[in-house]
Amino acid sequence: MQPDYFAFYDLPESFLPDEKALKAKYYALSRQYHPDFHATAAPEEQRRVLELSTLNTNAYRTLSHFDLRLQYVLQRHGLLEEGKQELPADFLMEVMELNEQLMELEFEPDPAVAAQVQTEVERLENELKAEARPVLEGYAALPADQRPAALLRVRTYYLKRRYLLRIRESLAKFATRS
């Protein structure tokens, strides 16, 4: 079981936490659990402080990075298990078409086609962001019974985002070759 980083920082579970509060909590706990301040403590206490220091670092690293935070929350709710990641067929068709264009670029480099794929990826990303923003912003305030539906929408957003990231990476490889 993953530790609850939100509880550790005394923050509500959120996809868009208060970044200032997050950073302030991280720095306060970094000072509190810095191993140098506990050098004369008993070995068990030193071990405990080192574990808390590591927990603090891992919590901040995860919660301060948007993609890692999405992944973390979804994993905590069991929504990123292998084989349970279905996406809408229309999105998969669009991605398949983009991937086919990328494969064609492998054999016949064409900057115009690459630019077209780039523009399409940006359009899809902008649509995704606009669709997900209200859910991400409102999640922390939702009553418990409404959170599962919101989490499913966020999972779809996360998975679509990852598909588009892979296409962007392929486009970047193409750009370095041409």
Image (cartoon, rainbow, N blue to C red):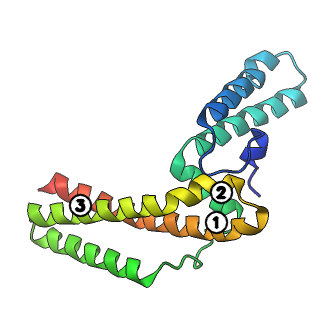
Pointer 2: what residue? 139
Mark 3 vs mark 1, CA separation in Å: 29 Å
Question: Count of labels shown?
Answer: 3
Could you tell me which residue is drawn at 55 percent across and 58 percent down? 134
Instruction: Tell me the tag on residue 118.
Output: 3
Mark 1 and mark 3 in contact (Cβ < 8 Å)? Answer: no
Quadrant of the frame with the C terminus: bottom left
Q: Amino acid at mark 3?
A: Gln
Q: Earlier in the sequence, mark 3 or mark 2?
A: 3
Instruction: Tell me the tag on residue 65.
Output: none
Mark 2 vs mark 1, CA separation in Å: 8 Å
**Observer-nearest residue: 131 or 170?**
131
Q: The residue tagged with tag 1: helix, strand or loop?
A: helix
Q: Amino acid at mark 1?
A: Leu
The part of the image, by quadrant, that contains residue 80 is bottom right
Quadrant of the frame with the N terminus: bottom right
Q: Earlier in the sequence, mark 3 or mark 1?
A: 3
Q: Position of residue 139 (x, y in %)?
A: 65, 57
Instruction: Tell me the tag on residue 151.
Output: 1
Q: Amino acid at mark 2?
A: Tyr
Q: Position of residue 100 (x, y in %)?
A: 24, 77
**Observer-nearest residue: 41 or 148?**
148
- In the figure, is residue 26 to the left or right of 172? right
Q: The residue tagged with tag 3: helix, strand or loop?
A: helix
Mark 3 vs mark 2, CA separation in Å: 31 Å
The part of the image, by quadrant, that contains residue 57 is top right
Q: Position of residue 3 (x, y in %)?
A: 76, 50
